[in-house]
């Protein structure tokens, strides 16, 4: 959805137009699910985070300023929801056993299957996601936002609530760590062949 269309749809959504809400949901659902899945690593957690992010987005859409793009705003809401789920886990209100499936498993829900395939299309992609998973949370997060969600440095800064310079630094270190992980993985692959 281009910016002009997005702005018109948001204005309609602010007026309570259900079809406009559906258009926004359709425009961002798979992108947010992919991000949540990469961050949360569990399909059920990712689905919960996306659902809550959309609920909060629609409840507060009247406060959204249409002169800005929606993507960073909705990603920030999603990030907060992911953090809320992590906090509930640490507090013991959500048990890890409640989410028996691993994030790489194929799910039975058709939409979930489509989302999973967007994230992981080949064995190489699966291995890359596994290597990204070895990064620290802060480094993995900027990598996902930049390369998977195509957010620029300023938008990532807005989503994470940190200075652009910090985003650049984290992205630099994330690339460096990922490069080392790829080199190590290639060495392991060569030694087992």
Image (cartoon, grey):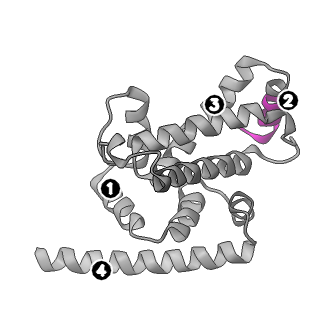
Residue placed at 59% from the left, 58% from the top? 145
Distance Cα–Cα, label 1 vs label 2: 39 Å
Distance Cα–Cα, label 4 vs label 3: 40 Å
The residue nearer to you, when weighing 186 against 64, is 64
For marks 3 and 2, the one nearer the N-term is: 2
- Can you give x and y, in whole percent of width and height, for residue 62 in the image? 85, 33
Instruction: Please check the rendered image and state whether residue 5 is part of the magenta-colored stretch, yes or no.
Output: yes
User: What residue does disc 4 label?
Assistant: 184
For marks 4 and 3, the one nearer the N-term is: 3
Numbered label attached to residue 183: none
In the rendered structure, the answer to whether residue 152 lies left or right of residue 11 reads left
Helix, strand or loop at label 2? It is: helix
For marks 1 and 4, the one nearer the N-term is: 1
User: What residue does disc 3 label?
Assistant: 25
- Crowding at dot 3, Cα within 10 Å, few <14 / some 14-19 / many 20+, comes out as some
Mark 4 in CB contact with mark 2 (< 8 angstroms): no
For marks 1 and 2, the one nearer the N-term is: 2
Vertical order, 142 against 9 (above or below): below
For marks 4 and 2, the one nearer the N-term is: 2
Numbered label attached to residue 126: 1
- Can you give x and y, in whole percent of width and height, for residue 168 in the image? 66, 76
Distance Cα–Cα, label 3 vs label 2: 15 Å
Mark 1 in CB contact with mark 2 (< 8 angstroms): no
Vertical order, 182 against 41 (above or below): below
Q: Which residues are magenta?
A: 1-10
Distance Cα–Cα, label 1 vs label 4: 16 Å
Distance Cα–Cα, label 3 vs label 1: 27 Å
């Amino acid at each position: 959805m281009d910016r002009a269309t997005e702005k018109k749809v948001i204005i309609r959504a602010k007026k309570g137009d259900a079809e406009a809400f559906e258009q926004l949901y359709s425009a961002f659902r798979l992108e947010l699910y992919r991000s949540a899945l990469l961050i949360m690593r569990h399909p059920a957690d990712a689905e919960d985070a996306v659902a809550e992010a959309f609920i909060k987005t629609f409840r507060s859409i009247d406060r959204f300023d249409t002169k800005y793009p929606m993507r960073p705003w909705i990603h920030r809401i999603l990030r907060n929801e992911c953090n809320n789920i992590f906090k509930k886990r640490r507090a013991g209100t959500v048990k890890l056993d409640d989410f028996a499936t691993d994030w790489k498993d194929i799910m039975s829900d058709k939409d979930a299957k489509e989302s999973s395939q967007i994230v992981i299309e080949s064995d190489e992609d699966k291995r890359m996601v596994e290597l990204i998973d070895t990064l620290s949370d802060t480094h993995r997060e900027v990598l996902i936002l930049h390369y998977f969600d195509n957010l620029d440095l300023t938008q990532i800064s807005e989503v994470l609530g940190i200075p652009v310079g910090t985003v650049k630094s984290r992205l630099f270190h994330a690339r460096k760590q990922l490069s080392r992980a790829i080199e190590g993985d290639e060495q392991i692959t060569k030694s087992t062949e």
